[in-house]
Amino acid sequence: MSTLPAGTVTFLFTDIEGSTRMLQALGDRYTSLLERHHLLLRESVTAEGGAVVGTEGDSIFAVFPSAPRSVAAAVAAQRALAAEQWPGDMPLRVRMGLHTGEGTPSGSSYVGIDVHRAARIAAAGHGGQVLLSAPTAALVEHLLPDGVTLLDLGEHRLKDLERSERLNRLLIEGLPVDDRQVRSLDVIPNNLPVQNSSFLGREREIAEVRELLGQARLLTLTGPGGTGKTRLSLQVAADALDRFPDGVYFVALAPIGDAELVAPTIAQEIGIANRGGLEPLDRLREHLRERTMLLVLDNFEQVASAAPVVGELLTSAARLTVLVTSRAVLHLYGEREYPVPPLGLPDPLRDRNVEAISQYEAVRLFIERAVAVKPDFRVTNENAPAVAQIAVSLDGLPLAIELAAARIRVLTPDAMLQRLAHRLSLLSGGARDLPERQQTLRGAIGWSHDMLDDAERRLFAGMSVFVGGAGLEAVESVCATDDGGEDLLDVLSSLVDKSLVRQVTDARGQPRFGMLETIRDFALEQLERSGDATDLRRRHARLFAGLVETARPQLLGAQKREWLDRLEDEHDNLRAAISWAVDNDEPELALRMTAGLWRMWQMRGYLVEGFEQVRRALAMAGAEHETVLRADALEALGGLAWWKGELGPAREAYDACLALRRAQGDRRATAEAIYNLSFTFAFSGSDADYVRGEELTNEARALFEEIGDKAGVAKVMWAFANLGWTTNQLSAARDAGLQALPIFRELDDEFMVGWTLYDLGVVAVKLRTLDEAQLHLSEALEIFAAARDVSGYVLVLDAVAALAEAQGDRQRAARLSGAVAALETSSGTGLNPTNRDLLGFQPDRLRHDPVTAAAWVRGSRMSTDEAIAEARGALHPGAGRSRRGKTTSA
């Protein structure tokens, strides 16, 4: 079935009973068993006009446009499974569930409550059973296959905690009758509340929490408001019901604010009578002592001082397990913490169509809740990017996503996305039967904020100046006070405990602290009210300006990867610092930061953004008085324009820079400015410009030689190699490059080693000395890949595409050209067209040639690592190793 049916359809879910036990018993033979199982079920489904929507492990999800035919398929499948001789003579017993409802296709699957209902019906059965919902039973009761009858099982609450479901079971002639009771919430004593909406996703989290429940008797689910702690705890409790024969009880603590009321509230929920004049805690001890029971204590954070009550219950009742939801841990012995993560999120830059984004839980939740309020809502390839960005902007928080989806009645996804700059105002209007704190996102966060003391509130507000988080030293530098108050680390730890600040470990193994953006928005509101905003933002800007100053001299040296990574990790903070400097008339700070960051922007693929940032700083009132910094910024502006392939703006900026350098009398800086300006003439294609470029290069060489700048002289040699390349004087270009290369190696200047090798490589491609081209381009690729220098490897990949075409491998050339085109778009790199013209390489022919067009498209979808691996395939067998013998990777 090429297109999934929509409208009224019947869903089938299947699952092998005891699959883990079978895997352990059969070992490698289980794979063939699973393949045969899948084949038999697929044959049964397709024979009755159904379609297999998906398989996951030993489970199959199928859909049918006809309810009677879905039953026929299930009966045929059970008979085929029963007739099969399975390895080890082990019976293969498969549970199946059928439900008829609304089929809403989304990508390659379905969304909607009816899909989840079908899955839950299947989960309620036992191996060999086929369960039907009431709608399906009503449609098929007079159209059953021969030898099949229906057995009414009555009403059952399934483990999705929604309303009760009337179930029926197929009795299939010739197959064993399995009278085991349906696996529902009615089997074990419990008070788990009915939920008004389906539970989506979280399969990994449910499995992890269930495993932890088997290891610890006290497990606390932590996270900020809106992460779905309560709903996850309820679902885990429902799924674990059969492990606690004496009952599973949910205790809502949100309505109470007095720790003294915790024990009586638990006793009331369990149903313990007040007899014998015993205190509630004593009654609980007595009642729970011999029982195997699970208590779910919800919203414990506001009665945190009652933690000892939980400890006493666990001590006196050896078979008691307690599952807690809280924004902070209880700090009890033996407690295990499970931080509830946000829902899985797409990458808006990569996942831009319906099928891609529908794989992610956050998107599926948005779609489900949107369809619930607007049944005709559909995600299309046109609005998919907006839906993906909405999910990301809301940090994958279930509450935030549900509140946003409720707005779909009046806002399209694109219109909603535009309003998310004010997300705390937008995300209100939740269901009126929810607690007030869950009706708005601001209310959910404010609930936690109200429980903070003064020191915690101060630091909570102060942390909002950081965008994307910060290390401990940065937090201390910006937020520490001199009033002799509480130690900042203690206060910060408390905010982490209360789930308002998140702690992660960065790539250097150091702790990093940050906030979800939804929480940061609330914290920013508190910061503005505090009166400390200006002072903290100034400290923040100066701190990160200092980081730029420290990093700047390292960006072309041996440690460039480490420093580039560090700057990119702090890019959001750096953006915020620059914006603050520009908005608050601090031209010295803005010029210093933008001039120092341009190499990071160039090498990490932020050319367009970097150019605009420098231009903004240069346009500030007062920037003209900062002459040295202005010259530095003009050099940065020229460099960014050059790498974008815009020679006119580059020449204009470099010319202005040179005028300032000459006036300042700094000979080395003047020589550098002349050298930079020479490139804008060398690559213009004009004979007159070539002459001017040669004059400037000679002038720069003379100055570098006068001041004894060995690196400068080597760069001039490289400039002459470029002059030779652009004028087709290939031997001269090669000789100049070979003269410069050993000097750069001696100076350990890998940046210039890489670019000299690139030039030698493209010259060799042009000369058709392809072995030499492979050698040079291979080493250049590894240098740029190791540094994650985007501009570098984009040019090298393009050269390797030309090399592959010269080798006769047009398919590889097309794949590489597609990858380069995508990277050029994302990074802004614009120098390749000039070099292609000089090489006579025309990738557009590969793109439009029917023989290579598909390869070009495949290449355009490659990740960076895949593109680099593709290039290595065109190079010599040692392409994955540098000439120094060190393995490198992107």
Image (cartoon, rainbow, N blue to C red):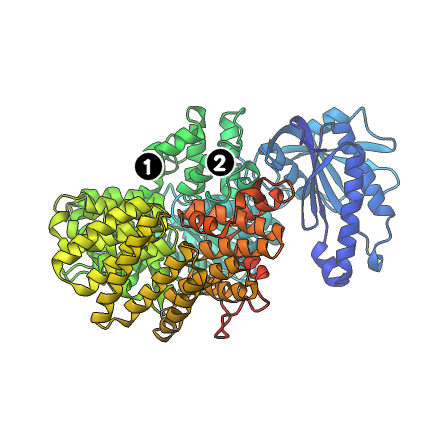
In the picture shown, does residue 225 fall above or below 558?
A: above
Residue 137 appears in the figure: yes
In the picture shown, does residue 555 fall above or below 437?
A: below
- What label does residue 421 carry, if any? 1
Cα–Cα gap, marks 2 and 1? 18 Å
Q: Can you identify the residue that label 2 sits on? A: 366
In the picture shown, does residue 456 fall above or below 175?
A: below
Query: In this image, 824 relative to 37: left or right?
Result: left
Query: In this image, 812 relative to 233: left or right?
Result: right
Give the x, y percent position of residue 276: 45, 51
Query: The disc labelled 2 sits on which kind of residue?
Result: Phe
Residue 495 appears in the figure: no
Query: In this image, 334 relative to 568: left or right?
Result: right
- What label does residue 177 carry, if any? none
Which badge, 2 or 1, is on the more N-terminal residue? 2
Closer to the camera, 681 or 431? 681
Closer to the camera, 620 or 520? 620
Query: In this image, 123 relative to 798: left or right?
Result: right
Image quarter (top left, top right, bottom left or bottom right) of the N terminus: top right
Give the x, y percent position of residue 851: 65, 43
Residue occupying the point 33% across, 38% down: 443
Residue occupying the point 61% across, 33% down: 164
**Quarter of the view holding residue 243:** bottom right
Closer to the camera, 151 or 599? 599
Query: The disc labelled 1 sits on which kind of residue?
Result: Ala
Mark 2, Cα crowd under 10 Å, few <14 / some 14-19 / many 20+, is: many
Give the x, y percent position of residue 144: 82, 28
Mark 1, Cα crowd under 10 Å, few <14 / some 14-19 / many 20+, is: few
Secondary structure under the numbered disc 2 in the rendered image: helix
> Disc 2, disc 1: CB below 8 Å?
no
Residue occupying the point 56% across, 69% down: 878
**Quarter of the view holding residue 131:** top right
